[in-house]
Structures are given as C-alpha cells and as structure tokens.
Amino acid sequence: MTSRPYVPGIDGMRALAVLGVVAYHVRASVLPGGWTGVDLFFVISGYVIARSLSGYPGSPRALITAFYARRIRRLYPALVLMLLVVSIATVLLVPAAWLSQTIARTGRAAFFGLSNFVLAGSDPYFSPRAEFNPFTHTWSLGVEEQFYLLFPVMLLPWILPGRAAARAWLPLLAVASAVYGMYETAHAPARAFYLLPS
C-alpha cells in the first residue's frame, strides 16, 4: 500500500456516520435516517481503499497480497473477540427457548464474512426477529469484507499502466450493479438490503 497524506475530513465523516448509527439504534425517532451512516461508511471505505491502492509501486500480485494481509490483520482480531464475547453472553444471558438456528448460523457465518447471506435468506433487517439476533450487526462487516475481496481485483485495470481498454468495464459494472439493486429492491428487499451488488 502507498502512504498517503492524512485527510482530517475523512475522520469527521466517520464521526458523523458513527453518531448517526448510534443515535438511530438508541432511539430511532431522534434521527430516523441515522442508519444511513452505514452507507456513508461504505463510501468512505471505497474512497480510502482506492486511494491506498492507487500508485502502488509493486506488482499486481504483491499489491493484492499486501492488501489482503493488511485487511486480515486489521479486521480479524476484533471480529474474533466480538464473536466470542457475544456468543458467551448469548449462551449465559438469553433463555434457550429464545435462541434459534438462524442466530447460530449467523454467528458462524460472521467469522467468514458471510453473515449477510444468512440474514438475506431470513428476516428483513427492521423485523423484530432480526433485531433480536445478536449477530445481525455483522451484516455490514460481511458486505465490507466481500467488497475488500473483490475491489482490488476490479481496480487493477485503473491503476496499472497500459490498461486503457480494460477500464471501460468498471463503469459498466457500476451501472449494472445499480440496475440490479433497483430490481432487487422491488422484488426481494431483504436481498437488496443485505447483499453486496446493490
């Protein structure tokens, strides 16, 4: 990764996103659209990742390997700790009659960055059952991990010299994703909410 100058505005946007999400979860009526802070996090992540990957001096393989290694070092220690704490707290504090297979599957899938797939096949995000699932919040991390997996490969034509012809497919992919997102929103809202393409 290349070292870029610090941009204080990014931390300011992150703070606004955190405040929005926290306010929404504490009392939705205070900031009904606060959940859009998650969308802002996604935009910030895309910008930061593209910025760190652009101008990388090494080979494409070194670029992708270094990127994935850095993401794993940054994400997985906190993820594993959170999954352990939430799992133990759930076993100790939640009556067995309230637990479901969806909760267990969501927790296991979260370890692999796939909890959003489990949730997309179950209840909508704003349903009471999804609210009760202690791992529902991991859906956004799943989307982000999947983005981290795909984005460096998709960005290669843009950052490598001599790839002008290949650059046209990324805007086409963005348009296709937007169209697919609109289709899914109309026909399968849970999938549109939880999954990466939209």
Image (cartoon, rainbow, N blue to C red):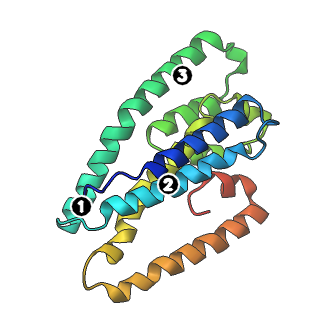
Q: Which residue is mark 2?
A: 44
Residue visible at 37% across and 70% down?
155
For the C terminus, which image quadrant? bottom right
Per the model, the C-alpha gap separating discs 1 and 2 is: 20 Å
Compared across the picture, whether 45 is left or right of 122 comes to left
Q: Which mark is residue 90?
A: none
Left or right? Give the position of 131 relative to 49: right
Numbered disc 2: secondary structure: helix
Q: Residue furthest left?
A: 58
Does the CB distance between marks 2 and 3 fall below 8 Å? no
Residue 133 visible in the current orientation:
yes
Amino acid under disc 2: Ile
Of the residues shown, which amino acid type is indicated by label 1? Leu
- The residue under label 3 is which amino acid type? Val
State which tag comes first along the sequence, 2 or 3: 2
The local crowd at label 3, few if under 14, some if 14 to 19, many if 20 or more residues have their Cα within 10 Å, is some
Quadrant of the rendered structure where residue 197 is? bottom right
Outermost residue to the front: 8
Residue shown at 47% from the left, 26% from the top = 82
Q: Earlier in the sequence, mark 1 or mark 3?
A: 1
Q: Which residue is mark 3?
A: 86
Q: Position of residue 34 (x, y in %)?
A: 70, 43
Q: Position of residue 8 (x, y in %)?
A: 43, 49
Q: Position of residue 60 (x, y in %)?
A: 23, 67
Location of residue 30 with respect to 174 vertically, above or below: above
**Numbered badge on residue 63:** 1
